[in-house]
Structures are given as structure tokens and as C-alpha cells.
Image (cartoon, rainbow, N blue to C red):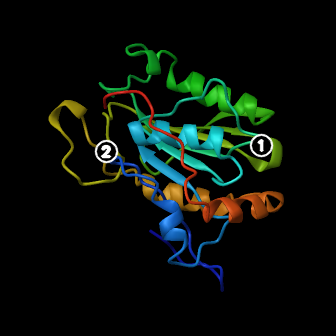
Amino acid sequence: AGGPLPPPPGFFFFFFFFFEFPSPTPKIASMVCVDPRRVYCAGYSRGGRYCALLASRLSHVFAAIAPVASLRYPSPNGSNRPIPVIAFHGTGDPINPIGGGGPAYWHSSVRDAARDWAVFNGCRDGPDTLETEDHHTKQLVYSGCSDGAEVRLFVTEHMGHVWPGLRFEFARGCGWRELDLIASKHIYSFFRAHPLPLAFEPRAREALYAPHWLPGEVDGDD
């Protein structure tokens, strides 16, 4: 994980929670140069829901989140600041339906979750609908938010429970892949635009080198 930045500290930190693994961050933080204002969470499915949990419990560490096929609004939301959110979801997702329903962790719709984040972030405008490079994807944008913490939701027609732009062979039960929309590109640009507010840097720096600070697992079987 990483990307080009000006002189030190010079690493973006992306957390792709495709799989479960125990508390990776403190060990990594002790090995490389970590910019404490550029620690993010990007997650797919259950990992994306974990990103919402991190935003709620560790808002002084994670600058922004990017749930893919998994946007949730934590209740209660323990964040002590607005959280920039970019998310992706398909209308054909059979695991986490865009309209909600199903398991207890998925009762509300994805659009409702985006709206709830926008309300929490104090967004005054939106949702505005924007076109994307993929003609069957619409981008819903909430703007005019406190601390610039905008909320962006990409909705792709017919797309299943997948990460847009990946050529990875998802399980057949996940539905249609989407290759024209490159989610990782949009996430990278969004993260670049949303560093952690400067006031939180001392707490983030301290937390990154703490021995144990990541919260536990989230519910769900996907």
C-alpha cells in the first residue's frame, strides 16, 4: 500500500480488509514512515463495515473511509468529528442488497446510510447526482459539509457484490462484475483530498504506536 507524496512523512496507508487479520497497524507503523494524518480504511463487504466501526471508535486516527459493497452508518456513532466517506454499491448486489433488508446488520438501505453520514457530517447540500466515466453509474454527492467532510456514493446498475474495476474472479453468487468503473482510482483521489484535521495529529501519532488499539470484529457472515 502506498502512493507518491511530497517529502516525509511520505506514505499513504490503505487498509483493505478483504480478510481478517489481527491488529496489523502498530507493527507496520514501527517499521515504516507513517504520516499520521494519512491513515485510511478502504474495505470490501465485511471489511467495509469494519471501516465504519473504525470511523466510529477511532476517528482521531482514520482520516476517511471507503466502504465497497458495504456502506453502513454505525449506531451509535462515537466519532468526535465529521468523517469523509466515499462508497460504492451495485443495484444487483445479492449479498448486501442496496435497498436493505436481510440480516440484522443490513436492515437500512445504502442510500439511507449515505444520508445518515451526510447528516452527521453537517452537509448542507445534496444529494446531487453526477455522471461518471461509466455511463451506468451515478455518483450521489453530499457537499457543503463541516470540515469539508463530503459524502460520495457511487451506484452502479446491475453490479453485484464486487469491487468495481477488479478483474478478480468473485464467487458466482456475488453477481455481475464491473470493470469500467475503477473504484481504487476514485478512492485514491478522495483520500488525497481528505487528510486528518491537523488538530488530531498528536493523538493519531500516539495511537499508531500503541500496542493494541484496533476494535474487535463486526457481525455478519459475508
User: Mark 2 belongs to which amino acid?
Assistant: Glu
Q: State the mark number for residue 118.
A: none
Question: Is disc 2 placed on a helix, strand or loop?
Answer: loop
Label 2 crowd (10 A; few <14 / some 14-19 / many >=20): many
What residue is drawn where x is 46% and y is 54%? 23
Residue matched to label 1: 81
Q: Is residue 169 left or right of residue 156?
A: left
Residue 121 image position (x, y, % from top left): 75, 36
Q: Secondary structure at mark 1?
A: loop
Residue 129 visible in image? yes
**Label 2 sits on residue:** 178
State the image coordinates of residue 112 (x, y, percent, origin top left).
Answer: 59, 22
Marked residue nearer the N-terminal end (1 or 2): 1
Residue lying at 42% horizontally and 47% vertically, measured from the top left = 134
On screen, residue 15 above or below 43: below
Observer-nearest residue: 184 or 16?
16
